[in-house]
Amino acid sequence: MRLYEYEAKEIFENAKIPVPPRKVARSAEEAKTAAEEIGFPVAIKAQVLVGGRGKAGGIEFADSPEETEEITNRLLGLRIKDTPVHSVLVEKKVEVEKELYIGVTIDRFEFKPIVIVSSEGGVDIEKVAEEEPDKIHKLHIDVNDKLRSYQGRLLASSAGLQGKMISKVGGILQRLYGVFKKYDAKIAEINPLIVSGESVYAADAKLILDDDSLFRHPELKEKGISMRHDVSELTEREKLAQAEGIPYLDLDGNIGMFPGGAGFGIASIDLVKQLGGEPANFMDSGGGPTPERIAKMLDLLVDNPNVVTIFGARFGGISRCDDFAKGVMIFLEAKGTKKPMIMRMTGNKWKEGMEILENAKKERPELFEKIEVFGIDTPIEEVAKRAVEVAREEAGG
Amino acid sequence: MRLYEYEAKEIFENAKIPVPPRKVARSAEEAKTAAEEIGFPVAIKAQVLVGGRGKAGGIEFADSPEETEEITNRLLGLRIKDTPVHSVLVEKKVEVEKELYIGVTIDRFEFKPIVIVSSEGGVDIEKVAEEEPDKIHKLHIDVNDKLRSYQGRLLASSAGLQGKMISKVGGILQRLYGVFKKYDAKIAEINPLIVSGESVYAADAKLILDDDSLFRHPELKEKGISMRHDVSELTEREKLAQAEGIPYLDLDGNIGMFPGGAGFGIASIDLVKQLGGEPANFMDSGGGPTPERIAKMLDLLVDNPNVVTIFGARFGGISRCDDFAKGVMIFLEAKGTKKPMIMRMTGNKWKEGMEILENAKKERPELFEKIEVFGIDTPIEEVAKRAVEVAREEAGG
Amino acid sequence: MAIIVDDKSRVLVQGITGGAGKFHTKNMIEYGTNIVGGVTPGKGGQEVEGVPVYDTVHGCVMGENPDVSVVFVPARFAADAVMECLDEGLKRIILVPERIPIHDMLEVRHKAGKAGATVVGGNSPGVVSPGKANVGIMPPIAFSEGRVGTVARSGAITYYLADTLTHSGYGETTCVGLGGDPILGSNFEDILRLFDNDPETEAMVMAGEIGGLYEEIASQHMSEIKKPVIAFIAGLYAPPGKRMGHAGAIVEKGMGTAESKVKALSDAGVPIAKKFSDIPKLLEERIGKA
Amino acid sequence: MAIIVDDKSRVLVQGITGGAGKFHTKNMIEYGTNIVGGVTPGKGGQEVEGVPVYDTVHGCVMGENPDVSVVFVPARFAADAVMECLDEGLKRIILVPERIPIHDMLEVRHKAGKAGATVVGGNSPGVVSPGKANVGIMPPIAFSEGRVGTVARSGAITYYLADTLTHSGYGETTCVGLGGDPILGSNFEDILRLFDNDPETEAMVMAGEIGGLYEEIASQHMSEIKKPVIAFIAGLYAPPGKRMGHAGAIVEKGMGTAESKVKALSDAGVPIAKKFSDIPKLLEERIGKA
């Protein structure tokens, strides 16, 4: 879960990382009042959960109340990478003498936290990493250790800082690492960290938390920071799926992908693609979905006008094929069959699942007109081939 | 630094260790009001910083307001191991089903924190440790680790707890360990931990902090817990020394011990004892005392009516013999010479020190009538022998 | 022989009294797995499917001497469950719970590494040594005794690999569900090394997928593996995922995509199966007909 | 030869720009100690007594290649100072500051143990190898080159031991101030082992005192020490100290008194010198006349 800049800055400030005076505003009026309190010049920054804000024109400077209003109005009308801007951060503009980059993340090669410092901060830090790797200084920290003050100083000194700045920036690194650990973060980053005379300020603040650790952080709610899904770039159907807790992404094709079992969602797309088909979506059922969830997954597909055929596969593991079949029946009974469904069932309770569908077919054959169900003896690739074939017919017809 | 029971209990309660409802009272009136709020029966416990309170009659139970007043008056008049009682803790009396002992300290053999649990809690825990060592369960924790919940459960289960009590007491152990680490404690102890139906309570609470880590704990001041010296059992002179920050203890003899260098204080007592003398005190100058501090050390000795002779020794290391000599002069010029002083100076700047005293002697020989100063060529045992001899003459005369 | 679990394994189930724990204990026993005990704090003395329940792993170790544990506790307690096993000397632990906090898993790896233990998962479907033991949540239907070891990040792909190997006649020595969580207890190469030392395993199939760096890491260790390895990577056609901050990018520099994984493994000499049906063909070239 | 420091030692002074750091750097240099660099964060580039100052130990290691560090920083920064040295590969660190937080010292011991480093102190007066190097705060006046190694918890007693050995003609190979703090970086036996491996040292004198358990711990390792050891324990006549809670008593069971120490060491075959003047007599029985 990514925090807004203003949320991250509050957490940083509480951890004694220096942050410029600032205030969130949700209207031009609020921004003007905030700017007058803070004193000009101010930076006005669109608050969004996507990167590349600077390049997209989401950060401007104002020297007067009028300019503040004007800029705020412009920013609040902006969409950055398809994300609307609902608030801005009005912040004291800081004299820049030197811009550093500092960040903490998890090194997924070494499976340890890693602290990164560069004397060349600013937006192009990744270019620096690529082109001038010796300007990037890294330090692994053992998982049970804290970042000690001498380690902070070593990094600060490696980055070319001198005199009192060594301990000052070293201390900020220690505290940033403390935030990273305390909040179970995946990333805690300040880019740029601005050196301005004797002072240092976190001019930006990025904090991405581990969703799976949020249960340990009820204090975030007290800070007004609630669980959010990253709805910025989602389509309407993706938002719908997210609301149901179903991992789902719209794609460009016409085969509705209805895979079973976490992890097979991705492989099934490769399979259909390699056989010449075009998937309409990615979906992940998660482990052991209930029949109701199965039915909701099908709803998402059948409601998608691009989908001409549904390709389903269930390999019952922790999930059970009888539940899968029950879910299919809930869907069919509610919505009827409009689009062909080509499915395979095998694994846990697959015979029971087949039986449920066969019995239902005997009772209400009209629901099963466009449905083909295969069992363990037909390899998955054969079933996928059939789905691609049917989709081609449907699309052509 | 040992905390009062009521201070430790507040810290424990903040750490979510269950503590019975309670209130501190400084008068019978306050105790009565507290007891009425809490509800009878109540325990009334003298708040002192010494052990053995129970055996000394410092804990009683009251069933009524009258009894509460009566008991409180009695306790507030009590002296426990020479310590006056200034306050009592009025606490809800808890039904006792089972008394456990739990404690965390530093194992000074293994240099690791150690958690100790016993199914036999109560005052006689040390007797249990001696006579039934298999009723004592111990677990070392690596210095960078926390106590994990399974470790708490393992200890609780070893101590014979069952069902939900395993996780409950296990959780309390975790939190007690957390307090131990968070506050840089030397000891965090609950004896007894009372099991009462489905509930568990810390009936007593002991927390001894590392004085040398208090700088890390400004939060204690905010809780109203201030640095205290353990003044309970001190003589008037000891209190005076403590106020000056000089480690000092009164002994029974007549030779005023004026040793130099941390650590030699103890050895000098052995030396005088073995030579047949009787030291009047223990004293430790600490490393590198200033002349002013030297003078204050002498003040303490010369003001002691038991002292008939002063035995001084200075081996200049981080301390300097010239400072030592200057301190002696400050003292002599302010107080004159009343008692014989037998001293040795060697080490760092000993010649300069000797010179200072010799020059002063030339100017004011009257101050040096009873003073003998030896240098590096006279072994310390010879000087001590001379001091014992002089003391014997003085005492005899 | 087999790896991690076999017919001699004495299996402990942590979280045995929960819904999933009970259900799968029954299935595992039905398969013939030797489940010797269970642990649920506070429920010591009960029985589940005839298996004695203990309050602590220590108690179970004293009473039943297990050598493998399979964990069904909620994700937030998973790290503790592993560490409890490590403290009691268990060297093989399979983590079924998914979405275990990543900082917890860093600690688990650290401690397991020091103990020399193999931790599989989180979000592992389990480990199956066909005909010997089934530890976890996988349905036995797809598996058959044979010559090839598999290790896959996803449960469903584990089934399809076994399905493919079973139908083509190779069969499996052991199928390991490496797990789907971001920070896992074991890497591919850890499992491949175990297969390399298993006399019955003739070749290995590893199945990775987009995201994470496990396949790239494995590619750096391929020279240490003596037996043939075939790789399958899911996500060749997956939409590009979102990037996460500069710090990750600085360390990882464009890795984590399916292309990066295919390239890393190909460069390390590992043949890539694009479809499940490629696997038997690639095996035939290496270890002969099924 | 000698232990810990000798004429080849390249000594780093941490906290060199502080009052004590400056003062003792001058003294150490005057003695002939090879002080190669100093560290004070933020003061890199300065000089103290002609010694270059660095911001970090890393910088000093790169520039001057020291192999011993003596620490003069305030107690609250002492643990960090040691760990900075350990990270840079230094194996000998002498801690002069006193009253270092005890939990810090537990961490220092843990990390130094893993690194195989010798940490002396806190509250150590230093280490003197007479005629070779004087690292710390001890006045050289009492020391002379010779045959006996000493290790003492107190600075003043270290002087008196050297005084005694010098006057009796034995002289010293190295005198180690183990330190007066409650949790020390090294135990007696750690230092005795170093002397045992030093060809020039013929016998050792260890001086303990009431409080702590270092002497009791040492007594358990005496069978590992091959050369003669003589012990001196201060505090035989000290008033009994105060007890600290049950937890300590349960673990320590009456240890820590002078009697307990004398008994433990005597039982381990170590002769006890009651007075300084006993030491030469005991030495004569073991290594002959001075």
Image (cartoon, coloured by chain):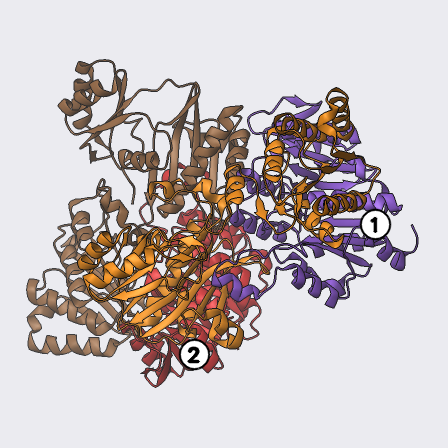
Chain colours: A orange, B brown, C purple, D red
Question: Residue at position x 29%, y 30% from top?
Answer: B53
> Disc number at residue C148?
1
SS state under label 2: strand
How far apart, in angstroms, are the residues tagged by discs 1 and 2?
Answer: 66 Å
Nearer-the-camera pick, A359 or D26: A359
Q: What residue type is labelled 1?
A: Val
Does residue D10 appear left or right of residue B221 in this picture?
Answer: right
Question: Residue at position x 25%, y 60% from top?
Answer: A70
Whether marks 1 and 2 lie on the same chain: no
Say which of marks 1 and 2 sits in front: 1
Residue A332 image point, x, y percent: 66, 28
**Chain that bears disc 2:** D
Any part of residue C161 in sight: yes
Q: Residues within 10 Å of mark 1 (few under 14, many from 20)?
A: many
Instruction: Reply above or below: B241 against A191.
Output: above
SS state under label 1: strand
Nearer-the-camera pick, A11 or B326: A11
